[in-house]
Image: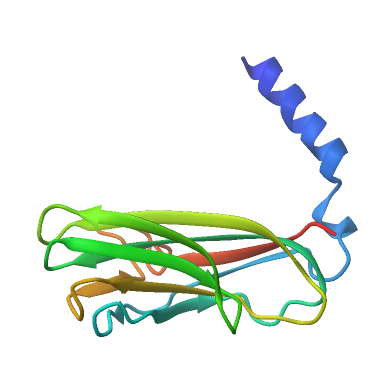
Amino acid sequence: MARYVGQTVASLNRMLGSATAFPGAGSATTFLTGDVAGGAINTFVNGPTTGSLAAGTYLIIAGGVYTMATAGQATLRIHNGSAGVKDSNANVAANGSFIPMEISLVVTIAAPATFTLQVADNVGATGTLKATATNGTTNKATSISAVRLA
C-alpha cells in the first residue's frame, strides 16, 4: 500500500507541478476567526473570503460547521461578489445539531474577483457558522481556499 500511495503522489506531483510553478500566489486559505450568527429566514450571512484573486483558473474549496438550535435546513454557498456560484444543502433533524458541509468548484475568471463562503437557514436567526468545532483547533472549523490551476 505504501508503494502505491508513493507512486500516486509522485504521479500527481508530475501532473500538477509544484505550487511555486503557478502564476501568481499559487494557493491560499482563509479561516473564520469568530462565530457568525445566522440571519433572517433564508438570508445569507458572510463567512471567510478568498481576498481578491487575479484573472485565471482556480479550484475553490469551502467548508464549515453550522449549528442550528431548531430543526431545519441550511444552505452553504460560494458567492462570487455578484451571485451564488455553487450551493449545498443539509437537513438538521435534531435541535442543536452540528452540520459539517463542504463544497468546491473550478472557476475561470477574466478579471479580479473575490469569493465568499456564505450560509443561510430556513428557520432564521437560530444558526451559527462556527469558527471552532467542539474540541477542535481554535479558528479552524470554517474556511475557504483558492488553488490557482492556470
Which residue lies at the image location 67% right of the left edge and 23% below the top edge? 5
Q: Position of residue 128 (x, y in %)?
A: 26, 73
Which residue lies at the image location 38% right of the left edge and 72% below the top edge? 119
Q: Answer yes or no: is residue 28 visible.
A: yes
- Quadrant occupied by the N terminus: top right
Q: Position of residue 140 (x, y in %)?
A: 43, 64
Q: Position of residue 66 (x, y in %)?
A: 30, 65
Which residue lies at the image location 73% right of the left edge and 77% below the top edge? 53
Left or right: 150 with respect to 63?
right
Left or right: 144 with respect to 91?
right
Residue 91 drawn above or below residue 128: above
Give whichever of 73, 24 is nearer the camera. Answer: 73
Q: Answer yes or no: is residue 135 visible.
A: no
Give whichever of 74, 5 is nearer the camera. Answer: 74
Left or right: 80 with respect to 122?
right
- Quadrant occupied by the C terminus: bottom right
Q: Position of residue 123 (x, y in %)?
A: 18, 73
Q: Quadrant of residue 79?
A: bottom right
Q: Quadrant of residue 49?
A: bottom right
